[in-house]
Image: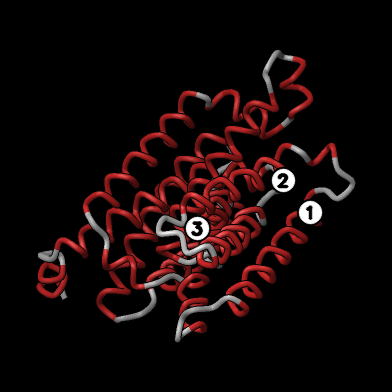
């Protein structure tokens, strides 16, 4: 098995794929803790559906670079969901569910009406569950992921205290002089960028699992925000690395295998948490 892995890693495409998946997993885990504690766990799934709808619009418009449509729409929806909840009548999970279902339905409808592909079902499945694009990455794609990962990590570290305050009590943070709206905006933009970056690799339906599972696993053992965040990042990277290696060896879908690794890890940490509690 070791010889087989060494053989596969002799190909640059495999090394690029592993690097990108690990970087995406790291970014997802950092912001995932905040979203879980703010009761916005479902937002990753909702925004991934928004991104799917935006991809459909870009496809209809025949854009060579769909990021020109996908990123602005996803960022706007993230801001509206995270920041605009108090200004609208439909809030929280209801707003996320409404946006999620609407974007998914409209996106699929547009792809059916204006489809120019001979394999529409294949295109939809690739977008929802990940595609072979992961094994056709270039060095520039890895550099973009590295840049975004560094930017997200640095932003999280620099604004850690303020994000911590906004996560647990926005009203109290405002009385302490923290601009809660500003940092909710930062969180919204970060999560939107991560989702857009990751959906082409692990699929729009699976990216929310990378956001939620590591945080929930870490919370089975640790209680402090810092320890949960650090543990979540470690879990996410290990599960992503294990998932893609198993996928390469067994020929299974990358995104689904990574999520399966996170599920196994979650149940392991749940068992460990119960033993620790006893």
Earlier in the chain: of badge 3 and badge 1, it is 1
Q: CA distance from mark 1 to mark 2?
A: 7 Å
Mark 2: give few (<14), some (14-19) or many (20+) Cα within 10 Å: many
Residue in view at x 21 percent, y 52 percent: 139
For residue 85, side relative to residue 240 (left or right): right
Is residue 11 depicted above or below 32 in this figure? Answer: below
Question: Looking at the picture, how far across and down is residue 36, in whole percent?
Answer: 64, 48
User: Disc number at residue 81?
Assistant: 2
Q: Quadrant of the C terminus?
A: bottom right
Is residue 118 depicted above or below 63 in this figure? Answer: below
- The answer to the question of whether label 3 and label 2 lie on touching residues, with beta carbons closer than 8 A, is no
Residue in view at x 61 percent, y 40 percent: 188
For residue 6, side relative to residue 203 (left or right): left
Residue corresponding to mark 1? 95
Residue corresponding to mark 3? 210
Q: CA distance from mark 3 to mark 1?
A: 22 Å
Question: Looking at the picture, how far across and down is residue 178, in whole percent?
Answer: 67, 18
Q: Is disc 2 placed on a helix, strand or loop?
A: helix
Q: Which residue occupies the foreground of this view, 203 or 271? A: 203
- The answer to the question of whether label 1 and label 2 lie on touching residues, with beta carbons closer than 8 A, is yes
Is residue 189 depicted above or below 238 in this figure? Answer: above
Mark 3: give few (<14), some (14-19) or many (20+) Cα within 10 Å: many
Q: Quadrant of the N terminus?
A: bottom left
Earlier in the chain: of badge 3 and badge 2, it is 2
For residue 240, side relative to residue 13 (left or right): right
Q: CA distance from mark 3 to mark 2?
A: 20 Å
Question: Looking at the picture, how far across and down is residue 203, in whole percent?
Answer: 48, 66
Which circle, 3 or 1, is nearer the viewer? 1
């Amino acid at each position: 098995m070791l010889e087989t892995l060494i053989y596969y890693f002799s190909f640059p495409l495999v090394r690029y794929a592993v690097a990108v998946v690990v970087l995406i997993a790291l970014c997802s885990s950092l912001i995932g803790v905040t979203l879980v504690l703010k009761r916005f766990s479902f937002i990753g799934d909702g925004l991934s559906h928004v991104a799917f709808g935006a991809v459909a619009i870009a496809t209809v418009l025949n854009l060579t670079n769909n990021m020109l449509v996908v990123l602005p729409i996803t960022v706007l929806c993230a801001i509206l969901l995270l920041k605009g909840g108090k200004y609208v009548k439909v809030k929280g999970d209801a707003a996320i569910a409404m946006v999620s279902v609407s974007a998914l339905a409209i996106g699929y409808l547009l792809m059916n009406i204006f489809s120019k592909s001979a394999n529409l079902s294949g295109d939809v499945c690739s977008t929802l569950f990940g595609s072979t694009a992961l094994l056709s990455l270039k060095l520039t794609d890895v550099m973009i992921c590295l840049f975004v990962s560094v930017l997200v990590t640095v932003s999280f570290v620099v604004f850690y205290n303020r994000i911590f305050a906004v996560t647990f009590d926005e009203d109290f943070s405002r009385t302490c002089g923290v601009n809660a709206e500003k940092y909710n905006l930062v969180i919204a933009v970060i999560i939107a960028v991560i989702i857009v970056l990751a959906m082409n690799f692990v699929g729009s339906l699976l990216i929310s699992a990378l956001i939620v599972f590591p945080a929930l696993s870490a919370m089975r053992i640790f209680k402090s925000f810092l320890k949960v965040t650090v543990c979540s990042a470690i879990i996410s990277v290990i599960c992503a690395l294990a998932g893609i290696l198993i996928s390469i060896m067994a020929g299974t879908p990358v995104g689904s295998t990574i999520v399966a690794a996170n599920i196994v890890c979650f149940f392991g940490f749940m068992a460990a948490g119960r033993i620790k509690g006893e």
